[in-house]
Image (cartoon, rainbow, N blue to C red):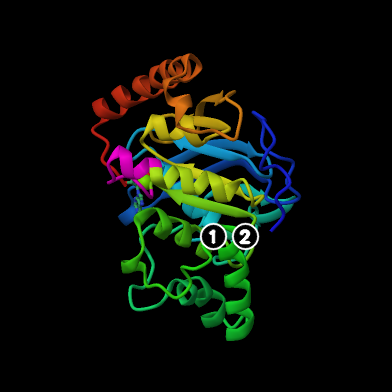
Amino acid sequence: MASTFAVETRTRPPAAARGAIRIEDVVKIYDPDGAAVMAVDHCSLEIPAGEICMIVGPSGCGKTTLLNAIAGFHTITSGSIHLDGEMLCGPGKPKADPGADRIVVFQNGALFPWKTNLENVAFGPVVQGKMSKKEAHDKARAMMADAGLSGTEHNYPGEISSGVRRRVEIVRALMNDPSVLLFDEPYRALDSLTKSVMHEALLEIYYRNKVTIFFITHDLDEAIFLGHRIAVMTTRPCRPKKILEVDIPHPRDYSVLTSKRFRELMDETLGAVHEEAIKAFELGEKEG
Ligand SMILES: Nc1ncnc2c1ncn2[C@@H]1O[C@H](COP(=O)(O)OP(=O)(O)O)[C@@H](O)[C@H]1O
Ligand SMILES: [Mg+2]
């Protein structure tokens, strides 16, 4: 994998060759038993290739619905979603092709405990028939080396530290060379120390791989620490209420959490999120 921006200091994402997402005027109405539930309302959001775009918003506002539309897990009612200028879904094609190699939904904690790390990383492309076992193992070995995982190939997930496991999970998600990784609150149940290990692993691997990241979270520290931008969504039906640029240069480490700029961004984000959370609370929204 290319490593062209690992040492650069930048607030904007690297100009990646692929992975630009354009969400345009997307509407999603669920219709359980004829009771129309509008989850997404004329939502437009452009995510440049290589950006880490964090999505925050009240529970039940429609964030997962949007992610599922990008992933091709369900249809949209109207509007369109493009990846690198190519329509994933839109007029005449309400559903994106799921499982497209270019878009991968990250699964936290999804390693098979009975397989070695190498077998876990190589597993996807082999079962999908995309690579021979040898090809997959060679590639997995190279990617693991790139992510600082040499020497752990033959360990089982239960034998390695959580920090190493996190790295293995991310490398596994990158095996098919996706241009976009989608995260749906993967670390929600974790304490802040464990999360910091996840974040470190994610950013470190991100700095070597030009991948676009669409990351839903409730955790504003996580949103500011990881993101180039944060889209604060309105209460249901969702669309961006406010987009904040996180003008803290990458690569970042945990010292930024105590910086003045971090606190300012936290205040700004919190203000926008809080307004919407109150509206959601009054509407009695439940998490979807
Ligand atoms: N399959 C479904 N059928 C009907 N309503 C749904 C379905 N999935 C989600 N919803 C509703 O859509 C709204 C948005 O849900 P969701 O996208 O999961 O929100 P979030 O991820 O922001 O918490 C919620 O009101 C939820 O109840
Ligand atoms: Mg959700």
- Is 68 located above or below residue 275 in the figure? below
Q: Residue at x 47, y 32 (%)?
A: 225
Secondary structure under tag 2 reads loop
Whether residue 162 sits left or right of residue 105 in the image: it is left
Secondary structure under tag 1 reads strand
Do we see residue 97 in this rendering? no
Q: Amino acid at mark 1?
A: Val
Q: Which residue, as the protein is rendered here, is positioned at the far front?
A: 151
Mark 2 and 1 residues: CB-CB less than 8 Å, in contact?
Answer: yes
Q: Amino acid at mark 2?
A: Pro
| Label annotation for residue 178 | 2
Q: How many marks?
A: 2
Do we see residue 259 in this rendering? yes
* Res. 101 image quadrant: bottom right
Whether residue 139 sits left or right of residue 17 in the image: it is left
Quarter of the image that includes the N terminus: bottom right
What is the span of residues highlighted in magenta in the rendered image? 186-196
**Residue holding disc 1:** 104
Whether residue 46 sits left or right of residue 258 in the image: it is right
Position of residue 106 measured from the top left corner of the image (x, y, whole percent): 47, 57
Neighbourhood count class around disc 2 (C-alpha, 10 Å): few under 14, some 14–19, many 20 upward: many
